[in-house]
Amino acid sequence: MNNEKYEEKKILLRKEKIKKTILFILAITIFFSIIVGGFLEYTKNQQPKDIQTGYDQCISSIMEKAITCDLIPINYNNKTIDLIAVDCLD
């Protein structure tokens, strides 16, 4: 009889350990899902701002060079053209 109680207790302890392990894995999975979801949302929202900042810096750089009447080389797809401000053609 004592042996039966010991075996039952052993089985219950094993079941408890399995439950705790499953809960731990579930908690870790939820935690990382939240972290990854937040990171993806952040990068999705950040990307358009970064692109706009790049465009703004490019246009600003071209305008700064155009004021000095220097030729401005523009490269795109292995093609280059030189720009100059119309006001500098006098």
Image: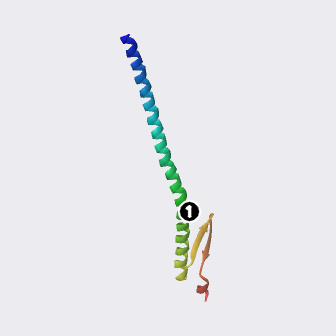
Residue 5 percent across, percent down from the top left: 38, 15
Q: Is residue 71 left or right of residue 22?
A: right
Q: Nearer the viewer, residue 74 or 12?
A: 12
The picture places residue 34, in percent across and down from the top left corner, at 49, 47
- Residue at 48% across / 40% down in the picture? 29
Vertical side of 25 occupied by 31: above or below: below
Question: Is 68 on the left or on the right of 16, as rendered?
Answer: right
Give the amino acid at mark 1: Pro
Q: Name which quarter of the figure residue 72 lies in.
A: bottom right
Up/down of 12 relative to 34, above or below? above
Circle 1 Cα neighbour tier, 10 Å, few/some/many (<14 / 14–19 / ≥20): few
Occupied quadrant, residue 89: bottom right
Q: In this view, does 27 lie to the left or right of 44?
A: left
Across and down, in percent, residue 11 comes to 43, 20
Structure colour scheme: rainbow
Identify the residue under disc 1.
Answer: 48
45 vs 6: above or below: below
Residue lying at the far top of the rendered structure: 1
In this rendering, the answer to whether 59 lies above or below 88 is above
Q: Nearer the viewer, residue 35 or 90?
A: 35
Which residue appears at 52% of the width and 49% of the height?
A: 37
Which residue is drawn at the image coordinates 55% and 67% (left, top)? 52
Residue, far left: 2
Q: In which quarter of the image is the C terminus?
A: bottom right
Task: Determine whether the residue tagged by mark 1 lies in a helix, strand or loop.
Answer: helix
Q: Please identify the residue farthest to the front as the structure is shown.
A: 1
Name the residue nearer the viewer: 36 or 9.
Answer: 9
On-image quarter of the N terminus: top left
Residue 63 position within the rendered picture, expressed as x and y whole percent measured from the top left: 55, 78
Q: Residue at x 49, y 52 (%)?
A: 39
